[in-house]
Amino acid sequence: MHLNATDIVREDCEQVAEEVSTLEALRGECLLITGGTGFVGTWLTELLAFLNDRYCLGVRIILLSRHVQDFRDRVPHLALRADVSLIQQDVRHVTELPSEVGWIIHAAGTPDNRQHASDPLRVMQVIVNGTASVLEASTRLPDLKKLLNTSSGLVNGPQPLDLAGIPETSFRGLDCGSLAAVYPEAKRLAETLCVAYRNQHRLPIVNARPFAFVGPYQLLDRPWAINNFIRDALQGGPIRIQGDGETVRSYMYGSDMAWWLLRILVRGAVGASYNVGSSRGVTLAQLAEMVAGGLPKRPRVLLGVSPVQRLHHSRLVPDVGLAQDSLSLRQTVDLETALRRTIWWHELRGRVEGADRGSKSP
Amino acid sequence: MTSVLISDPTLRDGNHAVQHQLDARQIALYAAAAEAARIPIVEVGHGNGLGASSLQVGESLLGDREMLETARKRLVNSKLGVHAMPGFATINRDLKQAVAVGVDVFRVGVHCTEADIAQRHIGYLRDKGREVYGVLMMSHMASKEVLAEEALKMESYGAEGVVLMDSAGAYLPCDVTEKIRELVKSLSIAVGFHAHNNLGMAVANSLAAVQAGATIVDGTARGFGAGSGNAPVEVIVAVLEKMAFSTGVDLYGVLDASDIAEKGLMRVIPSITSVSVVSGLAGVFSGFAKHVERISGEYGVDARDVFFELGRRNVVAGQEDLIIEVAIELAAGKRGGGCI
């Protein structure tokens, strides 16, 4: 069977969509996604498009973004669909939303820490002013059922190394005098804005705190360890790790993330916050070995490639008990599979861009 | 025992000292000696790095490709490094060529408050799987807080270390300690230091950097470099070993390499001249020295006055054309003499 990169994602959507009846409230509804052309928005659109095609869910999808043309170029199979509309707009300047919008996933704001360091004002404005604009415009919608604000797992502050998973209720101080606080502090304020709008305007808002993800549509030039490892591996290696590789992260596959977000949108309690991510922590050294093991010709893994005086260990792993227990959510794609499918997707994309030839399913 | 990574830009910074006229025989000679000495990184190129050969900052005798290929043939265990300044070095023309030639280590240098312009270069090189460091040049011109924020940008772009460059030889050891310590505290990646010897502080400053947590130190044979030169690599290796730091460099080998460089590369061994002292006090890039001395002679003005005026104008590398402007103004009596 010959597959292309799009087929991989479609298979993922098919696998994750187990209890579609739980999304019945979305049937025939209009859902707006801000930041809709990014990693989160693209996966949500893939999943909704699949649900429309397979289960006739009839969701009309509106993607609001500054990068509409890029989306058309990158994923024409989504951009050209009749059930997908695109609005080119800066989220900071939203004043009016289409009146038929009944559901909103507010996902604007980049987690790219290169932009946090280089353009912190813009990052803060997009998150804070953008959230305020969307919330204000939402107060004028005639029939808003629910708004999901996608925050960040970083709002909880640094995770103690001995805490296996950080729950939604655990908060530790951020150093607001540091540039590293730009993104999480802006996300914190955005969450508090949601609280104020829920209180004062009775907006039905639920909050999600995404952690780290992996999967198709995540660009390999992004400055995160997993992307760098996959990129190095696809180029034949070696996979280079700064320090001793003992920093701990966890990763959820894109299809699980999209499914969880839709379920939280529909079933999540107004006013609640839910962690979205994998509870399985891995050290970066383990992760690199897993990535290397996913390739037929295993690349070398190099630890401590440059001498570092002080090792900065950190841990970022969510406790997802709330989502699991109250919304019956579970992670369906394990990390090994997620890495294998991600690498496969990138290989297929590379081949399509290079020689436009198909591949057989492994 | 703490390890310190020695990076040797004799064949790059030293090119400043000979108006970028190092020839293939000289490059091959020193590269082979550095390889024999087990020096980890040997930096090669025009004094201002890839793509810099020009009328403005001086034309090199050899093109980048020839210099790099010549060194590449002699370096087996030692890594071949280059300095690349966005503005001189372009991705399509220069970085691609250097990657193709087989350069192992890229050091992307920018003015100390302009880390943003390094993003594309660092990103491109990481994407090619190369070892990349960020270099904050003229670092005496920014506070430790600003340097830490600029260095954090480079870390976010993918740099595997950040090197503070004392381009003007303006630091005292206490300045180095303060700034390196701040970077070590703020970054998750390696921190390095590149000294110039205008005030006779190159070795002391390098040691202060290591004691403050730097794990990368630059040194050149006999200090062969711009202005009054750099920290002599043979002294750095010897003193670090005495202080119980591990460099992996063979002491006799690096002493031999320095002897070879002195005889084979240098017209004169770098020394602290009156002008270079003034350059250090004025905080002006050491690479300006030969231009300032030549132009001052042409216009009949005191080179020291020119340096102090350039310092007042906060000039940085790449603004060499201002030297003539300052000399003309001084010659016309528009400005007074230098004092601090």
Image: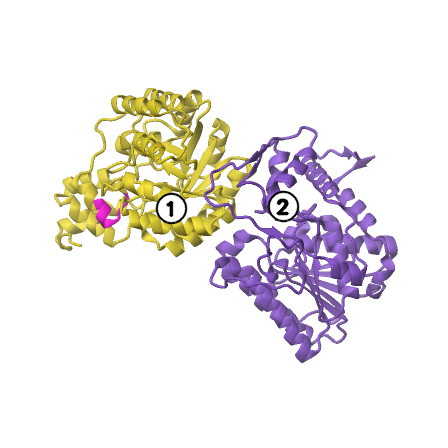
Q: Colour of chain A?
A: purple
Return the residue nearer the eye: A31 or A109: A109
Q: Position of residue B79 (x, y in %)?
A: 45, 28
Q: Quadrant of residue A52?
A: bottom right
Q: Residues within 10 Å of mark 2 (few under 14, many from 20)?
A: some
The quarter of the rendered structure image containing the N terminus of chain A is top right
Magenta range is: B279-285
- Mark 2 or 1: the one toward you: 1
Residue type at mark 2 is Leu
Q: The residue tagged with tag 2: helix, strand or loop?
A: loop
Q: CA distance from mark 2 to mark 1?
A: 37 Å
**Left or right placement of residue A354 versus residue B2 in this view:** right
| Rendered image: mark on residue A219 | 2
Residue lying at 47% horizontally and 42% vertically, measured from the top left: A308
Label 2 lies in what chain?
A
Q: Is residue B139 magenta?
A: no
Q: Colour of chain B?
A: yellow
| Rendered image: mark on residue B290 | none
